[in-house]
Image (spheres, helix red, strand yellow):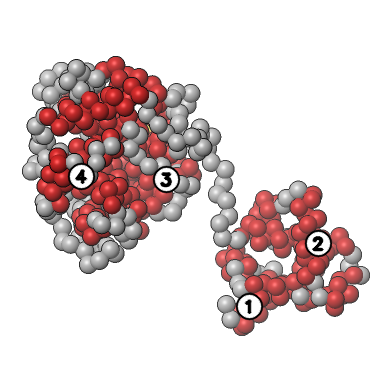
Amino acid sequence: MNEERFQLLTEKYLEGRLTDDEARELVDASAELRSRLFEEVTMAGLLDRAEGKAPADFADKVQAGLRTTAEKEAMVALVMGRLSSAARRRTAFRGFIALAAAALFLISLYVVLRPGTPAPAPIPVVRAPETKPFAMSDDATRAVARGVEYLRKTKLPIAPHNTPMAADELVLLAFLNAGVQPEDPLFQKLLGQVLTTKPQRVYCISLQAVLLEKLDRVKYRERIAECAQFLVDNQCVNGQWSYGTPAPKPAGTTVKKTRDGPLTGNNSCSNFAAMGLRACVDAGITIPAETFDRAARCWRELQRVDTDGRGGWCYTREETPHRPYGSMAAGGLYALVVCDRLAGRDWRQDKAAKLGLDWVTYHYTPIENYGPVEELMAKEMISDTPNMSTELYYYLWAVERAAAVCGLEKFGPRDWYAEAAHELLASQRPDGSWSAGVKRCNPVYDTSFAILFLTRATASMKD
């Protein structure tokens, strides 16, 4: 801020014409310029205004900035100590009370408008304890090890919806979180296949970004940037993601959008894309802010509110009849919170996120992917009779991800991890796998999801 600008803002302040943005600019000025706010002319103007009434647009903010009596006295002492002798003489006849009021007004204004002002109070949530890091129980550790051995021995499938991509990234991510060393021969073989395959599908590329960021974000930054470019260029016009098509390589670690994907996508691909985008940002890749804004806006628009007022998500909004269900609701909550955070917004102030959290909390159960059974039957999406375990393990990993980014140890009174871990240990098969028992759900995927849940693979996002 130059001298001319400072004088203008000071004059507007004394005349009561200063806007909120100009006030912020004034208190963010250099220390030398700010100190002059305490000089005789400025202080005289402040005292004049203190005898009257603070501008209406500042009233609430000033009130919010007031502190205890002791703090107020300290503020007054600070201002008095910085006044010049001439200013003290000029203000003496006005009285100590007027000076105190002015000082409080100025300090309160600075407290409220300074950078880093605390956000409004969040909705009540149960926070994860920060002093005690997570550690798996011995039983869970053994179960994870058995799951890893199953994955080592079985043939990895190619999912029909992910053709021609195999499950390499998902298995690698499960391995990495289970403690399998990168030097492991099978790990190296699968990683080599991943790195030599051109990015083609949103599911795989999203998981690949998460894997490589966790493995070595510096070493694989170029490839992670390629993942970011793929995700940015495959975002649909409405803000969703579909399965994706190949995209060009970026020039460096700053991604610029070169095209749009199709008109619409689905919420399954979209919540995986949020996972991938978060990993890319964590790895230092610069992504257009519009990507997060469009995605968050779409999640809000696609939310379905039940008759009880709780809001969740299903596969797509166009499916009718289709109510929210567990795996999509938890995945949607995760994705919306991530997009809000990456866009610099407080998710606790997002109405759709709060409705989603309420839905997931109310319907949480570790033994059922609540809601999709009748929908799957109606749409004939699977060839055998669905049951309450349909996509259960996919759902549980979505729950783990949502809880991690929201910072929750419990959904309401329920300890989501302890309850689900108990059920997972009881339902593991003799060969070390987990399986929902329906054709739609492959044991390789279910086992990987179970491992990712038990190891609590998702890193929290700092407030």
Q: Position of residue 18 (x, y in %)?
A: 64, 69
Question: Which sits in the foreground, 247 or 416?
Answer: 416
Amino acid type, residue under disc 4 in the picture: Glu
Q: Residue at x 14, y 41 (%)?
A: 185
Label number found at residue 461: 3
Amino acid type, residue under disc 1 in the picture: Phe
Q: Residue at x 58, y 55 (%)?
A: 117
- Screen quadrant of the N terminus: bottom right
Q: Residue at x 29, y 16 (%)?
A: 426
Residue denoted by label 1: 6
Of the image marks 3 and 1, the number of the one nearer the N terminus:
1
Q: Residues within 10 Å of mark 1 (few under 14, many from 20)?
A: some
Q: Position of residue 271 (x, y in %)?
A: 28, 42
- Do the numbered discs 1 and 4 sit on residues whose CB atoms are within 8 Å? no
Q: Residues within 10 Å of mark 2 (few under 14, many from 20)?
A: few
In space, the residues marked 3 and 1 are separated at their CA atoms by 39 Å
Image quadrant assignment for residue 3: bottom right
